[in-house]
Image (tube, coloured by chain):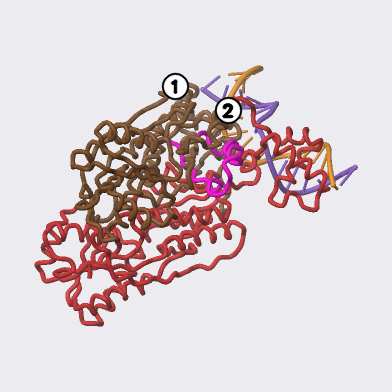
Chain colours: A red, B brown, C purple, D orange
Amino acid sequence: MREMKAKLEDVARLAGVSAMTVSLCMRGDHGEGRMSDATRQRILDAVQELGYKPNVHARGLRLGRSNVIALYAGHGYLNVRSAYFAEIVSGIQEGCHIARKDLLLQGAFHTAASCDLLPELLNGRVDGLLVDMLPNDPLRPRLVEANLPAIAISNEMEGIPSIVVDDDAGGEMIARHLFEVGHRKVAYVIDEFEPLSGLNRRLSFLRVAGALGMKTTIISQERSDDWWVWIDETVRSGVTAFACWNDAYARDVLAHLLDMGIDVPGQVAVTGFDGCPVTCIEKYALTTVLAPWYAVAKTAVLNLSARLAGEDVPPKVVYPVRFVKGDTT
Amino acid sequence: MREMKAKLEDVARLAGVSAMTVSLCMRGDHGEGRMSDATRQRILDAVQELGYKPNVHARGLRLGRSNVIALYAGHGYLNVRSAYFAEIVSGIQEGCHIARKDLLLQGAFHTAASCDLLPELLNGRVDGLLVDMLPNDPLRPRLVEANLPAIAISNEMEGIPSIVVDDDAGGEMIARHLFEVGHRKVAYVIDEFEPLSGLNRRLSFLRVAGALGMKTTIISQERSDDWWVWIDETVRSGVTAFACWNDAYARDVLAHLLDMGIDVPGQVAVTGFDGCPVTCIEKYALTTVLAPWYAVAKTAVLNLSARLAGEDVPPKVVYPVRFVKGDTT
DNA sequence: TTGAAAGCGCTAACAG
DNA sequence: CTGTTAGCGCTTTCAA
């Protein structure tokens, strides 16, 4: 730095008061009712002139908090290229803006095994955590035990206040719709690792589909599998619709079906779940369930902020979803 | 916290050494050559047992650095919903992973006027900054003067080492292509606020188009303008191609053209610039210029990291681009 | 090879 | 209404 950063003492000297008076004045309330207006104004002027900002490390060390939160995405790492995470991160940004927090995207999250992660989180850098993870993530019990304030996003977590969407209703909407447009034999496509939200969607789907007399199969695939093969086999087996646990899978299935020359939705239908806006002109608008991820994430930040302030937050918030008919059914 | 966080002293006590020996051992080199192997092992065991992690604020206060960097997106705020920023942020994540840095998405960036921003950045929270901004951003001179280490992304900045793509070559590729497929009267669509990258693409495009004898108009539009009106007028005026400064604009133009029942590329062609992967099946693959934004961002982090380590970095790195023929020309 | 002591910049408690 | 004092947890001289 060319010019050394101003510190509390510099401001104090310029304003002709002691350091602690300045400190008082720098708090949220500007030391309301604890100093004369004239003094406050003199201090604020000095702050302005010197471009003074309290050093976050000194403050953090003293106060034991940082006003920084982080997002832990359990499955894989946080991939903002996915429409889902783009919505989540956008919502978090909005929440951080309102709650005056900063969001840290930790390099450590890319690499560390979950078991090494907790100490990394307790080093004072973050005050709290948003988590979006699988039910059996080893971090969960440790988080609860360590008492690090956390809010679960999208997937309910035992012992952690959660913000989710109505996966049950969504699963049911898809099942009913497919039944209504005439499908009687459908495949439900899930990820190799099924988050709780996925499980809820699936169980609800299967329950309703079963009650309506539809035949169902479950297909659990890795992204690396040979999709052409299993999609082909499934279609041959008489399945006329692929209900996918999320939009990303639905779009992959759709792409392969089109590639194989199968008419959508004439021969085979496809549905998803998420409804995140996309930035391009789609060939086929997906029939899906629109979930308000932006609001979910924003609320998660606000609730985390409330927890950090010592307030109580509801253990579970459920946002409604909406069925969206597209061109794929 | 149920159990108070372990501190240096606790580890020292358990290992039967003094705090400073532990401190030495916690550095990158584990205090190589400054203590016996037995001592080091005892300390590392104690660290393991207590789950000790150095407090970042104490360390930051003492050392004057945080190993955290931030991204400042000058035009508007950082919107990860856009394919461009998704690529940039992904690249930054990768870079942070390699360089062992964390990325902070500052709440302050949403709100603060540029002029209030600099103090916010000098409060010790971040060691350095990646900037992607307009040439006349008021933050630029202040950044240079304050000597806060920074690297410019995508848009070259005077006095700041920059990582950019070959906008000139890209502009030329588009012009040549449009000429080759028969267009003689084209519109170049730019943003109301033109970043340097946009300017370079445009000037290069106009130069080459002019040399080839094409007639050109420049259209500068706000997102809020009535696109139907100006697109309609432009088409009526005999323009047969819209060359857009980036893909987002190109997709907007394309959507409106299709909406107006105009055949693309039969009647009118559209081109973009960026080539970011999209997550859906596009109706029309865009003819565009593919720029390696992921690599740009990753390199930016690595160079910033090098600067922070006191190394010299090249003042300007230019990544090549590649022309991609799509369905819109 | 190890220890003792000072201090990074700030704030909370307590005096005045 | 304002000042004094102590200490947050760490690293870094300097001394042993």
Q: Quadrant of residue B142?
A: top right
Circle 1: element type: loop
Helix, strand or loop under label 2: helix
Report whether mark 2 lies on the same chain as mark 1.
yes
Q: Is residue A294 magenta?
A: no
Q: Which residues are magenta?
A: B100-128
Q: Name the chain under label 2.
A: B
Q: Which residue is mark 2?
A: B145
- Frontmost of labels 2 and 1 is 2
Closer to us: A97 or C5: A97
Residue type at tag 1? Asp
Residue found 22% across the figure and 67% down from its top: A270
Q: Is residue A126 visible?
A: no
At x 17%, y 74%, the residue is A185
Q: Earlier in the sequence, mark 2 or mark 1?
A: 2
Q: What's the amino acid at mark 2?
A: Glu
- The residue pinned by badge 1 equals B312
Q: Quadrant of residue A42?
A: top right
Taking depth in this image into account, of A247 and B83 the one nearest to the observer is B83
- Drawn side of residue B262 relative to residue D6, left or right: left
Residue B96 is tagged as none
How far across and down, in percent of the image, does residue B48 sit? 46, 41
Residue A181, picture quadrant: bottom left
Which quarter shows the C terminus of chain A?
A: bottom left
Q: Residue at x 55, y 65 (%)?
A: A313
